[in-house]
């Protein structure tokens, strides 16, 4: 079946502009995660949605970052007033509600470059 | 706090065995994951350990000791295609993953 998809695959924006990144999780997956990965670094957790529960926003680096998940499916990560340090690959992952095991399936990512 | 340590780089020879270590200190523990990430691609799931001991899956095995906060990924019969970054991640209560920096493995002929 279809995997996690993300759009756009690449985004170049000017410093100070707002950007929206989209994630389509695997159908039926109740959990959705956003991470970012700077060049040569590990993945940094940003935000986590699980079903109808309040999202875990503990990883968002500043109030310029926000995310929403509409209808329990598609998610949008918004970065306002982008800064050069926001340049990174933004990865989305989803997982089924399997109780103990939370294997996450990753999308191909959106490479964001802020000039 | 949360801290996950793994070596930055490793080099091994085709056909050999390599062990990638990971130590962790986290505020909660609900399992340890290993992911493989080829350059420019998304991470893909390799293994999951929640109980102490060894989990074997083909050429790859993963070990966990919760009392020592320690895991390793063992890759046997190395192939050139195994050259990739290997990410250790701990799941805390609630399901989110805390990742280490990744170990860049280079397999040489």
Image (cartoon, coloured by chain):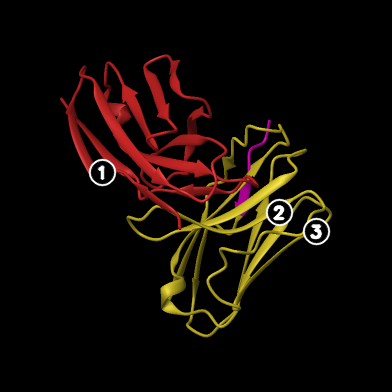
Chain colours: A yellow, B red
Quarter of the image for residue B77 reads top left
Are discs 2 and 3 both within one chain?
yes
Which label was assigned to residue A49? 2
Which label was assigned to residue B7? 1
Residue at 39% across, 44% down: B24
Residue at 31% across, 43% down: B6
Residue pointed to by mark 3: A70
Which quarter of the figure is the N terminus of chain A placed in? top right
Q: Residues within 10 Å of mark 1 (few under 14, many from 20)?
A: some
A17 with respect to B99 (left or right): right
Can you say whether B48 is above or below A86 in the image? above
* Chain of the residue under the numbered disc 2 shown in the image: A
* Chain of the residue under the numbered disc 1 shown in the image: B
Please, what secondary structure does the residue beneath circle 2 have? strand
Q: Which residue, as the protein is rendered here, is positioned at the far bottom?
A: A16
The percent position of residue A89, horizontal first and vertical second, equals 47, 59
Please, what secondary structure does the residue beneath circle 3 have? loop
The CA distance from mark 2 to mark 3 is: 11 Å
Residue at 45% across, 54% down: B2
Q: Can the viewer see residue A115 in this picture?
A: no
Are discs 1 and 2 both within one chain?
no
Are discs 1 and 3 both within one chain?
no
Quick one: A10 or A99, which is closer to the camera? A99
B6 with respect to A12 (left or right): left
The image shows a total of numbered marks equal to 3
Can you say whether A60 is above or below A83 in the image? above
Most frequent secondary structure within the magenta stretch? loop
Q: Residues within 10 Å of mark 2 (few under 14, many from 20)?
A: many
| Residue segment shown in magenta | A1-6
Q: Can the viewer see residue A100 in this picture?
A: yes
């Amino acid at each position: 079946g279809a995997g996690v998809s993300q759009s756009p695959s690449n985004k170049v924006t000017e410093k100070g502009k707002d950007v929206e990144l989209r994630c389509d999780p695997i159908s039926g997956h109740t959990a959705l995660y956003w991470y970012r990965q700077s060049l040569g670094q590990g993945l940094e957790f940003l935000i986590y949605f699980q079903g109808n529960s309040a999202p875990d926003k503990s990883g968002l680096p500043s109030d310029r970052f926000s995310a929403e998940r509409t209808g329990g499916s598609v998610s949008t990560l918004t970065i306002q007033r982008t800064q050069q340090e926001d340049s990174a690959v933004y990865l989305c992952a989803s997982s089924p509600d399997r109780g103990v095991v939370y294997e996450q399936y990753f999308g191909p990512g959106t490479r964001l470059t802020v000039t | 706090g949360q801290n996950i340590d793994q070596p930055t780089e490793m080099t091994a020879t085709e056909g050999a065995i390599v062990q990638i270590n990971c130590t962790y200190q986290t505020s909660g523990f609900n399992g340890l994951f290993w992911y493989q990430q080829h350059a420019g691609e998304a991470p893909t799931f390799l293994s999951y350990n929640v109980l102490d001991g060894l989990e074997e899956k083909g050429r790859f095995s993963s070990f966990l000791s919760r009392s020592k906060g320690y895991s390793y990924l063992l890759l046997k019969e190395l192939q050139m295609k195994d050259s990739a970054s290997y990410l250790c991640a701990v799941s805390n209560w609630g399901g989110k993953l805390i990742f280490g920096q990744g170990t860049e493995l280079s397999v040489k002929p």
